[in-house]
Amino acid sequence: MTGADRAVRVSLDVTAVPVRPVGAGHYTLELATALGRRDDLDLRLLARRDDGRRWADRVPGVEVVPVAPVARPVRLAWEQGALPRLLRRLGVGVHHGPHYTMPERSAVPMVVTVHDLSFFVEPAWHERSKVLLFRRAITTAARRAAVVVCPSHTTAAELARWCRVEAEVVVAHHGVATDRFVPDEESPGSDRDVLERLMPGLASRPFLCFVGTLEPRKAVPELVAAFDRIAGAHPEALLVLAGGDGWGTAAVEAAVARARHGDRVVRTGYVDDVAVPALLRGAVAVTYPARYEGFGLPALEALACGARLVTTSGTVMEEVAGDAARLVPPGDVRALADALDAELRGGDPDREAARERGLGLARAHTWDASAARHVHAYRLAAART
């Protein structure tokens, strides 16, 4: 390879991905896998000391450097102090921090992913310590990174609204894991088996489904209230909340306790990779009423499974899903209840056409396409040296 086609040596920081990844963790996993398939990139994965084997198995053939401390506070200090020396030793041409942060003093050009601006838009959605940390990290990245990657045009516009942006900005949409999120079950009856393991009898009941961590911006208490308004008219219907506990769990529990039909709200906890597509395919409709997201990957995954989707207008989910989804204003419990009622009643003549539009949108969002946009960002960063 010569000139613009020469492989750039890139280090990707995978130290923040937990054993049970969600959100940005899934993004980093899928991005690393897609980048590892490319032959125009010399990739290094920087992992925690206890996590090298997972990454070696996930991205075979790519060098994994398991050197980062395990504890998060120590790891953040390591990023600022020891990481720049490691990058020099590895001969890295570009370093990518996929979760807001970067070493502030390094001669190596930095690419930083800013997933959303919720720490500025509505700090009450987060713990105060995280607000302080990530506001500073985002402000620093906007000024000092060579390139900032945003997952949507909505997020890119908000970055410019809240920060002084001196970095180049590249929009790289997320992709869908096409080996998992598909409209057809793996084999006849396999989805039913998965659903029955989650809850006996679930496969034979009509249910609405939410997938995601329980945190304030996801508006799950409002979803519980909306379901409660229409549950009496649909006595067999369930609301399934599939996701691990987050900072908003207490508010969800309080909403369920207040609901007249709270006994028909099913909490599954964290759901593994096999079960999520089965839930999406089995639901009468998937509902993702988040007030705010940087991209809204769960909405796109629902469309990839051929599911009906109810989500929020005026948000990035509308940018992603468009006319393939039923849109309601964020925070409007009555409108959300009406939409859920309409889905449970069925009979929408546009249902099949909307399903096909959703499948088409999902096919256009691949992780390989996302990886190509990231490589473009790496080349822009390398050219700024």
Image (cartoon, rainbow, N blue to C red):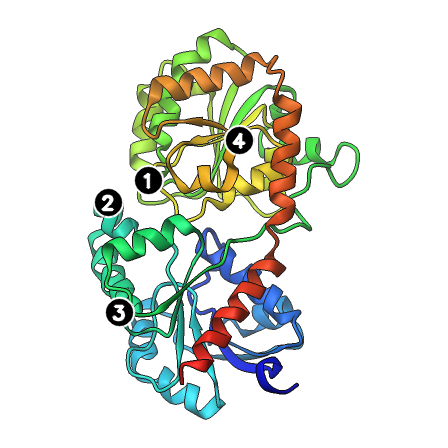
Mark 4 lies on a secondary structure that is helix
Q: Which residue is mark 3?
A: 140
Residue at 55 percent of width and 23 percent of height? 207
Name which residue type carries label 4. Answer: Asp
On screen, residue 290 above or below 68:
above
| Residue matched to label 1 | 217
Label drawn at residue 323 = 4
Label 1 close to label 2 by CB (< 8 Å): yes
- Where residue 131 appears, x then y in whole percent? 23, 55
Q: Amino acid at mark 3?
A: Thr
Say which quadrant the C terminus sits in: bottom left
Q: Answer few, some or many: residues within 10 Å of disc 2's Cα (few below 14, many 20 plus, some between 14 and 19).
A: few
Q: Earlier in the sequence, mark 3 or mark 2?
A: 2
Determine whether the residue tagged by mark 2 lies in a helix, strand or loop: loop
Amino acid type at image mark 1: Arg
Contact between marks 1 and 3 (CB within 8 A): the answer is no
- Residue type highlighted by circle 2: Glu
Viewport quadrant of the N terminus:
bottom right
Disc nearer the start of the sequence (1/4)? 1
Mark drawn on residue 122: 2
